[in-house]
Amino acid sequence: MEKEKKEVDEKYIKAICINIVKAIIVIFYFLILNLISEKIGEELFRRGIQICTMIFLFVAIYIIEKAYKEDDGVKAIDGIEVLVLATAVLTLEYITNRFKFQFNSYSSTLSYVFAIYFVLKSIVIYTKGRKEVEKSLSDIEEIVKKEEPIKKEATKKRKEKVEEIENKEKTNKQENKTTKKKTKKEVKNNG
């Protein structure tokens, strides 16, 4: 029964690759937004952002609905990620105007934040996969049974308890004998 030594299972590798691709796509999307913001007019750019946001919102709703029907937590998290991305893009113009940020630097910062999130998520998935592989390679579960250990009572305490019980029984017997003698004497005296 030889177990293969894998660093991480394939399903975790797939999830890690998907998250890295998501990070690259988000960076690429914000890079395109930066380039387009300099090339086209402001009104046309606003319309483009609104259209992209609507597309992201529809995709997020679709993913969340599908996750709800399949009762899949991973898809639900993916839907929430797309929803947060859509919200970030939708508020991009408002925040840059309200707080007087430069659009290019703010959108670059947002892309870095999303990329860092996806990379950290990949690291967590990798760590979880490593722990699972290490647990599967461990023979401890086969060696150790999951039974409760036998509780042994201390012999000294037990002997003391036995002696105490015996002493109580002796005193009870003696008390019973004395009470019987007293009752016999009382019966003779009364009778």
Image (spheres, rainbow, N blue to C red):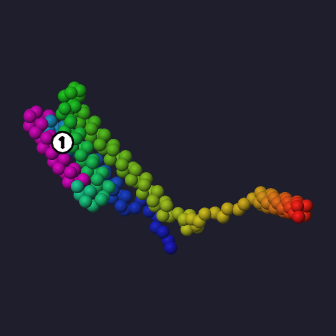
Compared to residue 136, the image places residue 75 above or below, namely above
Residue 166: image location, x then y, percent:
82, 62
Residue 117 seen:
yes
Q: Residues within 10 Å of mark 1 (few under 14, many from 20)?
A: few
Compared to residue 77, the image places residue 174 above or below, namely below
Residue 168, located in which quarter of the rendered image?
A: bottom right
Would residue 181 be found to the left or right of residue 147 on screen?
right
Q: Which residue is at the front of the view, 24 or 49?
A: 49
Examine the structure image and report whether residue 47 is included in the region drawn in magenta.
yes
Q: Which residue is at the front of the view, 182 or 89?
A: 182
Compared to residue 99, the image places residue 6 above or below, namely below
Residue sitting at x 21%, y 43%: 86
Would residue 4 be found to the left or right of residue 180 on screen?
left
Residue occupied by mark 1: 32
Examine the structure image and report whether residue 94 is included in the region drawn in magenta.
no
For numbered disc 1, what is the local secondary structure? helix
Predominant SS along the magenta part: helix
Residue 13: image location, x then y, percent:
36, 58
Please give the range of residues in magenta: 38-64
Locate the C terminus and report the quarter of the image it occupies: bottom right
Would residue 156 be found to the left or right of residue 150 on screen?
right
Residue sitting at x 45%, y 57%: 130
Give the amino acid at mark 1: Ile
Q: Which residue is at the front of the view, 153 or 26?
A: 153
Q: Residue furthest top?
A: 100
